[in-house]
Amino acid sequence: MGFALSNMQLTSTAFEHHGKIPAKHTGEGTDVSPSLAWTAAPEGTRSFAVICHDPDAPLVKSGMYGFVHWLLYNLPATTTRLQEDTGEGTPGTTDIGQTGYGGPMPPEGHGSHHYYFWVLALDQALDLEAGLNLGQFLERAEPHLLGMNRLVGTYKRA
């Protein structure tokens, strides 16, 4: 299928689509992941993954652009929501160099950035090891992608 939007809908109780992400969910706050919920997963979904990516970050490394703030995979097909500060799934390595969620915190004076929270539906439970970076994860997950969609939030450093 490749990377194309599907009919899945991704929402959060923390912010609306294109709304401001509360400081609580950023590097300037308590830095906890926001709650997320999704519906309308494609038929045949066997697992999910979640990514938070800032394409406005002026970085390019290893052929990837932007900044990865969260990578979470090995979420069972029965998962339709993640609670705030979730401990579910297997964490990948972010561009901060750690596993787990690392919230928005654009450079000072850099203006407002857009943060894409993606949910990916996969046709297999991949049982991937912890600590993969985004490139490693996508290399293994892309052949199994059934659908995806995103929720975009914004944040400007105080």
Image (spheres, grey):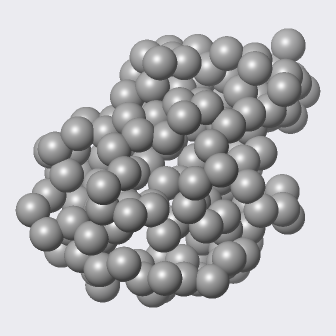
| Above or below for 20 versus 64 | above
Residue 90, quarter of the rendered image? bottom right
| Above or below for 140 versus 20 | below
Q: Position of residue 158 (x, y in %)?
A: 85, 13
Going by the picture, which residue comes out furthest to the left?
43
Q: Residue at x 73, y 55 (%)?
A: 100
Is residue 36 rendered to the left or right of residue 67?
Answer: left
Query: How many marks are shown on the rendered structure?
Result: 0
Residue 99, quarter of the rendered image? bottom right
Q: Residue at x 42, y 82 (%)?
A: 126
Residue 83, quarter of the rendered image? top right
User: The N terminus lies in which quarter of the figure?
Assistant: bottom left
Q: Position of residue 147 (x, y in %)?
A: 23, 60
Q: Position of residue 127 (x, y in %)?
A: 49, 82
Is residue 65 rendered to the left or right of residue 24?
Answer: left
Q: Residue at x 48, y 69 (%)?
A: 74
